[in-house]
Image: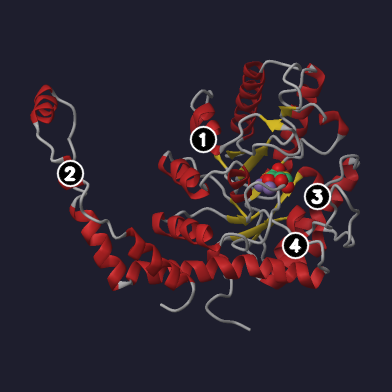
Amino acid sequence: MTDKYTPRPEHRFSFGLWTVGNRGRDPFGAEVRPTLSPVEIVRLLAEVGAWGVNFHDNDLVPIDATPQERDRIVREFRQACEDHGIVVPMATVNLFFDPVFRDGAFTSNDARVRAYALQKTMRAMDLGAELGAKIFVLWGGREGTETDGCRRPDEAIKRLRDAVNFLCEYSLDQGYDYKFALEAKPNEPRADIYFPTTGAYLAFIETLDHPEMVGVNPEVAHETMAGLNFMHAVAQAWEAGKLFHIDLNDQLPGRYDQDFRFGSANPKAAFWLVKFLEDVGYAGPRHFDAHAYRTEDYEGVKDFARGCMRTYLILKEKAERWNADPEIQALLAEIKETDGEAFGKFSKETASALLARQFDRAALASKGLKYERLDQLTMEILLGVR
Ligand code: GLT
Ligand code: MN
Ligand code: MN
């Protein structure tokens, strides 16, 4: 069935190999779905209408593969992407699965582990570049602690800075033209992960040798786990020119990392997010870093993937409807009326004028703002009666 919610390449919907390829393993149970090869995953993504595929180095090439095996896998994968019209917008590196990273990768106390993590990342950058990736995500899943006796956190920050600076130079030296996107998460798999929020990374980026090469990859679930408003984090990244990538999924606060289908847990928050991305004209990939329920077979995985994209497009249409709604526009115009210039740029004159000004606080606080009406109209659009 083709309708206006059918994904098209210009929507830039992408999935990681690890997302639709997720076999449903969790800490309490084994996998419930058979392994799909990367080539089979590309086929599945093409079938559901995705535009792009992303991967960790070891989603594509097993960690112990020989150079010959690597080359064969890359050849077959590239061919599958070409055959199915799927692109590789982003690549990343797995610095969390292997036991060597049990106490961190770039922040490990063991200099050999830090060096190995850097080598592994450089090779993952080679692999991504070979397949056309221009964005390189770094998610430091193991960069954290259970006991803070193990190292001072400021030492960990310095180590991460050294690693990212090295990787930027490597990208420049190789002519890869990568943009790095740092992905925050507050906890899981570590009890605490350094740089728990997108805001923490935004501050860190400014301390790097090449801040212009580094931005963020905010994820709905991760900011929600921290009890934060995801769209606000995205907006701060956007305003700073740092929204290099985005991980869309869904999550209920106060739970384990759920990675649900986009929009399935909090459709209203998803609506504000989609509206923001579309209003500001975010042109990067819309990456779904999510996976299907453990109850599903691969038909259910396709339902999951189609659902992510369809919900995005439905919410995009709702956002257009919101923007065009006359009553909403009238309310916004009323809000805007009192939104003039507050104090201008600082000068001795503007400062003394402001100090001399009289304010009628009671009058300012007396007018109802009609946000109840505004929100109800929003709800009615979302619930399909408007
Ligand atoms: C892992 C994690 C994600 C990250 C991926 C990139 S791997 O699935 O939960 O949030 O984006 O390393
Ligand atoms: Mn993610
Ligand atoms: Mn996640």
Residue 358: x %, y % from top left:
9, 35
Label 4 is placed on what type of residue? Ala
Q: Are the residues flagged by discs 2 and 1 in contact, CB closer than 8 Å?
A: no
Classify mark 3: residues with Cα within 10 Å, few (<14), some (14-19) or many (20+): some
Quadrant, the C terminus: bottom left
Under circle 4, the secondary element is loop
Q: Is mark 4 within 8 Å of ligand 1?
A: no
Label 2 is placed on what type of residue? Ala
Instruction: Point out the frontmost of discs 2 and 1.
Output: 2
Residue projecting furthest to the bottom = 1
**Mark 2 vs mark 1, CA separation in Å:** 36 Å
Label 1 is placed on what type of residue? Gly
- The residue positioned 65% from the left and 24% from the top of the image is 160
Instruction: Point out the frontmost of discs 3 and 1.
Output: 1
Instruction: Point out the frontmost of discs 3 and 2.
Output: 2
Residue 289 in the image: above or below residue 316 = above
Query: Which numbered disc, 3 or 1, marks the residue that appears first in the sequence?
Result: 3
Query: Which numbered disc, 4 or 3, marks the residue that appears first in the sequence?
Result: 3
Residue on which the image places disc 2: 362
Residue on which the image places disc 1: 199
